[in-house]
Image (cartoon, rainbow, N blue to C red):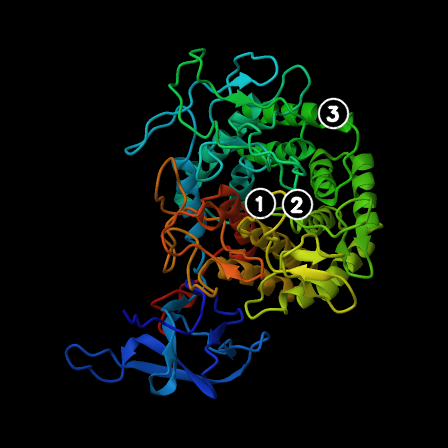
Amino acid sequence: MNIDRPNIIVNHVGFLIDEAKHALFPATAAGEFELQDMLQVDEEAPLGAFENWRVVWRGQLAPAPEGGRWRGDFSAWRRPGVYRLTLPNGGGRSLMFTIHDGILADLPPLFLDYMNGIRCGAHENRWRCPCHLDDGVLSVSGQQIDATGGWHDAGDTRKWMTHATLPALALAEYVEHQQPGARRGDYLAEIEWGVRFILKMQDPATGMIYEDVGGGRDTRRREGMTWWYENLSGCYADNFDNRFTDNIPRSGDERPVREQYNPMVQYVNSVILLKSAAWLDAPLAARARGAAWACWQFTERQPPDERAAVQAWRLLAALAMQQTAAMEHALDTLLDLWSPRTGFWFMDREKQDFHRGVWNSAQPLLALAEWADKMPGHPRRQRIEQVVNQCVRDYVLPMSATNDFGLMPYGRYCRPATVGDRYREWPGGGCFRYYMPNHSVQRVNHGLGGHWTSWAWALARCATVFDLPACRQVALDQLYWLLGNNPAQASFVSGIGYNNPMPHSRPYGYLLGGFMVGPRGDAADEFHADTAGYADWSTCEYWSLVGAQTVLALSHLLPRTVPNQRKLGAVI
């Protein structure tokens, strides 16, 4: 069957009025392209024929960076409306998109409703019943504790404390910087739900926050595998406890609560507790602050973990705690791990490889932006701004310019990390990949929605704190990639845009507003995504982290208010 599909690639949601507007055109195109207003018709089409949408603007095509496509720039068009792009004489067309200042504004409330739907514990609605009321049993002592609540992490039922609680931070950030209006109470209720779960996951004797609930056993483990890989923990855990239970404590099918120290868990959840406290009632806010302080004291007594990602979260926690000495130490560590030659960070003190991550990819940059925002008069503020500017100039902009989509590659390597995978040369030494390697001994090749939205979050903050418009555009490009501006022309958010892949969502099936992990690469470092309905977890599994970081980015990218003349329907 010959299926006629649009051959001009553009993000599906559209563009803010004052932002750059680009699309990609096939290699066979040349010369001119057209912008059509889909509210205007030049003449009525005969029955059975296509409408003749009115051309309102024309532009010239230019070569795209990779050499196989053309790029069209229509940034000069600033009128709200519903549009598509075409090539003259029927040579091509795009999917429909909009231009107005309310684009992307539907994503935070959609994500809010999604998170409400994947609550774990004593929650029910019209399509699901309460679950895991018997969570859980401590993995070492065997003691039954109340670890009910929280949210399921992804297209499964596990609860990872490194990132599954991040939606509470995202919703708190959105309430602080945007105007949720009539739904403010819903946002606050969801923040409270997340905070109450974190409090349950804290060891009352030590202050340590446990690592996960139902994370799984180690039957996947093979020689050479480690629990941590590319700043993601739990990498050899299996799916044994990815299941529903009978909801009866002490019946024998309870899921374990992993009593394992994870420094990332401690700093991440300390930040969440402290940032969320502003939106809680006074007694609960006091409990949250007390829990964060107990967690902080416990963690600071442990042997230091000087990986860049951990120290970035430590800086954020110290900033929220107002712990000056720890703040300065974390700042010193991040500056020591930063490479002036490349403009980016090393993974750790050994400085044998560059910082990368399935998430936390841009965490050092984000931490510096947050520190600079809170410390405008600090003597080191100018130095931090210099580091950020050089990172943007020497790393972010060159890396995002390597491809047609403005996408931040997965990362740089000092040398190839695997055999059998393609690594692209980087001018001046080293190499890079757009995606994770396919032949790692860890047997993890993960869609990089967490990586791209980490960059969107960090660059959105850099744009506002340091007045760097280029950061704003790269931040938006990371989101556009997941919203249809990709080779598959697929939006990886269920219910938003076109060509949504079938999600890997084992407990619930399709859920409106579910953010998927997104595309991954193959051994040749080329795009791969399951668009054929195989429910491939590595590209189509829901992952709340992706939605959370999207909301964190949008909290700083979206206009706080939109006047009517910048909305659809405005007559200009």
Task: Provide the secondary structure element on which disc 3 rests.
Answer: helix
- Asked whether disc 2 touches disc 1, contact meaning CB atoms under 8 Å apart, the reply is yes
Q: Nearer the viewer, mark 1 or mark 3?
A: 1
Residue 378 visible in the snapshot: no
Helix, strand or loop for disc 2: loop
Disc on the earlier residue, 3 or 2: 2
Q: Are marks 1 and 3 in contact (CB under 8 Å)?
A: no
**Residue at (65% x, 25% y) in the render:** 260
- Residue position for label 1: 444
- For the residue pair 293 and 377, the one nearer the viewer reads as 293
Q: Residues within 10 Å of mark 3 (few under 14, many from 20)?
A: some
- The percent coordinates of residue 80 (x first, y second) are 40, 70
Left or right, 381 with reference to 463 = right
Residue corresponding to mark 3: 297
Marks 2 and 1, Cα distance to the nearest angstrom? 10 Å
Image quarter for residue 299?
Answer: top right
Q: Which residue is mark 2?
A: 230
The answer to whether residue 25 is left or right of residue 228 is: left
Q: Quadrant of the C terminus?
A: bottom left
